[in-house]
Image: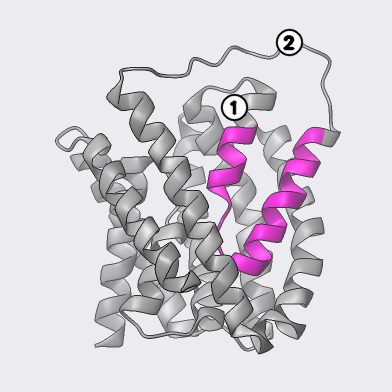
Amino acid sequence: MTFLLSITIGLLAGILGALLGIGGGVIMLPLSGLLLGYDAVTAVSTTLFAVFFTAVSGAYGHFKNGNVRVKEGLLVGAGGVIGLLPASWLFKHYFSENIGMLEGLLGFLFLFFALRIAVDFVREWRGHTQQQKANRRQYNYIKPVLLGVITGMFAGIFGIGGGFIMVPGLLLFFGMTPLQAVGTSLFAMITISGIGGLIKLGQGFVELPVGIMLGLGTIIGAQLGVKISDHIKPLMLKGAFVLLFLYLAVTYLF
């Protein structure tokens, strides 16, 4: 039953992630707790392990379509490892023993997600979209590394791939197109989620069979999501996710 639920959660995460342009981690994380009954520590760790599968599959597809800027992806990934290592240490020696604190932080994280999606929802509802222009200024190697450090810290503590952080950052600071930002984010996520997942596996926090099933489910679900994306309006899904993440924020905080 657990394996069936795991694959189903992965499928759902892959489908919705493809429809909304987000990583599957933000979907797998709460569902692992709600449906599989995992505590915050196990849910965070197993989710990060599963995100690796999504990142590899998604990055490969975007790379074939020319939507990965390799240099930026490598720099963000390197920065991610820098942020990931101390965050993983902090997770093991503090948050794993203070689950209440971790759940409180997750509550604020889901509140952030709700507000982030709500902003996109309102913009699309009003018919406004952001147009990004290429950044022709002198290249700055520090920005992608710093972006990676922040992303790695989030990954190490919250178990998410960091697409909600990386994609806006890549759009804002590097003038990427939306597809380039998503593709480059997934490419950087391979390093961050791969190393982060192995660290949490070594720390004994990952439910390995479930993590594999979640990952395989997201790979299949992402392909299905792409195929049905022309038949479903993402705007309505975003509205539903605002309500879901608000509910989760209240649940974890109170």
CA distance separating discs 2 and 1:
13 Å
Among the 4 quarters of the image, the one containing residue 209: bottom left
Q: Which residues are magenta?
A: 143-169
Counting from the top left corner in percent of width and height, residue 163 is at: 54, 46
Q: How is the image coloured?
A: one colour
Classify mark 2: helix, strand or loop.
loop
Q: How far across and down, in percent of the image, does residue 176 sit?
A: 59, 23
Q: Residue furthest front?
A: 254
Q: Give whichever of 54, 83 is nearer the camera.
A: 83
C-beta proximity under 8 Å, tags 2 and 1: no
Image point (73%, 42%), residue name: 147
Q: Between 165 and 246, which is closer to the camera in this rendering? A: 246
Could you tell which of marks 2 and 1 lies nearer the N-terminus?
Answer: 2
Is residue 66 visible to us here? no
Which residue does the numbered mark 1 point to in the structure image? 171
Q: Residue furthest left?
A: 231
Q: Amino acid at mark 1?
A: Leu
Query: Which residue in the protein does label 2 denote?
Result: 136
Main SS class of the magenta portion in the image: helix
